[in-house]
Amino acid sequence: MPVTWFLTGASRGIGLEITRQLLESSSNTVFASCRSPATAFDLDALKSSPGTLHIIQIDVMDEISIKAGCSKVLELLNGTGLDYVINNAAINHAGDLAFSFDPAALAETIQCNVTGPALVTRFLLPSIEKSSRKVIVNISSPLASIGRDLGPISTSYSISKTGLNMLTYKQSRERPDFIPILMDPGWVKTDMGGEGAKIEPHVSVTGILNVATKLTSADAGKFYTYLGKVNPW
């Protein structure tokens, strides 16, 4: 049975690996969005995969770009449903602290990491409603968890991801027919993960997709790790 997927931040890191793994199956159609398709060479190379790939231009910092890109997805779907939405694109001004962060950097981080995913999901709503799955995976972080007690690092990023957690909770309560969840991908060896990261992208993504494809309505609003364990908030 054909399955449709949409994701942001698909040109590198976790997003690129999600796209690669999904396209290994001819049953998957993937709408992979990124800020600059013209320079997304690794993403473009996946067009020869068994699955179907549509590369969509979206800058999650720009509402007009989000609306235009999502409209293109709706056009390509041509009235069919969108089964999975993965809000993956994010920025992190690493190293900032609670008593010394840059207010402009905080605002930019919230725009990208909270407002962007909110608008993406809003503009894709007509196609999500037509799906029998209605899964929304918002990529969060253990830094969003007070319960994990990870200290003072990455203040702006942590605040934004905690905001994303609350957005996901609100989505699950507003639309009980949807399955919005949060996903902690682990500390992955990507450009954003930086030095010290422990997990290979393919390991994280295998886990993410395994969790996502097994979700039920009982999971809505929960905060999972890529291993399927529930994170504390």
Image: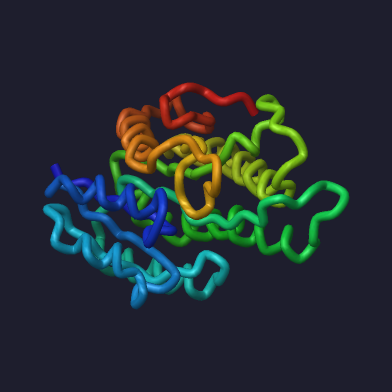
State the image coordinates of residue 83 (x, y, percent, origin top left).
31, 46
Left of 207 or right of it: where is 231?
Answer: right
Residue 151 in sight in this render: yes
With respect to residue 150, does 67 lie above or below?
Answer: below
Residue situated furthest bottom in the rendering: 38
Q: Nearer the viewer, residue 91 or 94?
A: 94
Identified at 74% across, 34% down, the residue is: 151
Q: Nearer the viewer, residue 85 or 10?
A: 10
Identified at 30% across, 69% down, the residue is: 41
How many discs appear? 0
Q: Quadrant of residue 38?
A: bottom left
With respect to residue 189, does 103 lie above or below?
Answer: below
State the image coordinates of residue 14 (x, y, percent, origin top left).
40, 49
State the image coordinates of residue 222 (x, y, percent, origin top left).
52, 29
Which image quadrant: the C terminus? Answer: top right
With respect to residue 178, does 160 lie above or below?
Answer: below
Identified at 55% across, 60% down, the residue is: 116
Identified at 77% across, 39% down, the residue is: 152
State the image coordinates of residue 200 (x, y, percent, origin top left).
39, 39
Which image quadrant: the N terminus? Answer: top left
Q: Quadrant of residue 136?
A: top left
Q: What kind of colouring is applied to the model shown?
A: rainbow
Left of 12 or right of it: where is 25?
Answer: left
Left of 26 or right of it: where is 3?
Answer: right
Residue situated furthest front in the rendering: 195
